[in-house]
Image (tube, rainbow, N blue to C red):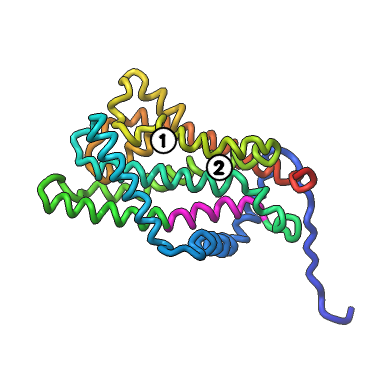
Amino acid sequence: MTGSAKRITIIKRRSGWFDLDLRRAWEHRDLLFLFALRDIKVRHKQTLLGPGWLILQPLVWTAVFTVTISGVAGVSTANQPAPLFYLSGLIVWSYFSQVIFATSLVFIENEHLFSKIYFPRIVVPLSSLISTGVALLIQFVVVLVFLIAFHWMGKSDGLSWRIVGFPLVVLHLAAASLATGLILGASTAKYRDLGFMTSFLVQVSMFVTPVLYPFSAIPEQYRVMASLANPLAAIVEESRWCLLGESMLTPGQVLASLLTTAIALACGVVLYQRVERTVMDTI
């Protein structure tokens, strides 16, 4: 036999609900960072403040909530300074909402890309976790600055050992955000009406999640149910435990949130990869 051997890759259409092909997604992990970098550049392209918006937005919302929700309405902030209370919840909700917006229209917004080249489609929503994680990191630093400032003024206990658990909170948050985003992304590809509802649903999530009020405002007998129905409720409280040192969470409530997150993530991955096989024929 003469000549050099040629490597031929045969791409077969997968079948079965649980044929996830996660190995191929891992092989394309370099695309994660390329798509994440693309998202970051596009998000801040031709803006006056650039990444400064990542700092300004939570600060403005914190100021508004401090004046209206805490000051005028008199809603409790669990014996914490109002700015710290709202910031520690807003950074969690902001990450969740940004991932949802990035993944809910993933098939529609990337139609031109998906129709021209093959790669595991799940790489795109996974990359949104990284690009949005950069924003979370910046906002986390802002919270640390506020913690130090309020401690210096004698109004807060400052940093504690609990802060080392925050990366685990981020993992829980990323899983819950991805799970919701994958389910919405797969559903929106079939029913575009859901795309119009996404913004509304995200805004509603702020009010059904203890971002503007403490977790203790939920009657004790309903807290496990609340954590099951809305995992983000427990995640916000986990964030406040790590950053502010106080929490009404119990291990059972955390486990309830983790259980729902795990089930939703498994369903989201299966549904997303099931839809991706035929969506380009109907989109």
Tag shown at residue 181: 2
Residue 157: say if magenta: no
Residue at the (31%, 30%) spot, across then down: 215
| Residue range highlighted in magenta | 120-134
Q: CA distance from mark 1 to mark 2?
A: 16 Å
| Element carrying mark 1 | helix
Residue 154: x and y in percent read 10, 48
Going by the numbered disc 1, the residue's amino acid type is Met
Q: Secondary structure at mark 2?
A: helix
Q: Residue furthest left?
A: 154
Q: Does the segment drawn in magenta span residue 122? A: yes
- Local packing at callout 2 (Cα closer than 10 Å; few below 14, some 14-19, many 20+) is many
Q: Is residue 233 visible?
A: yes
Question: How far from the left and from the top, in percent, is residue 281?
Answer: 80, 46
- Residue 165: x and y in percent read 31, 47
Q: Is residue 163 above or below residue 238?
A: below
CB under 8 Å between discs 1 and 2: no
Q: In front here: 44 or 126?
A: 44
Residue at image mark 1: 206
Residue 76 drawn at (x, y percent): 23, 30
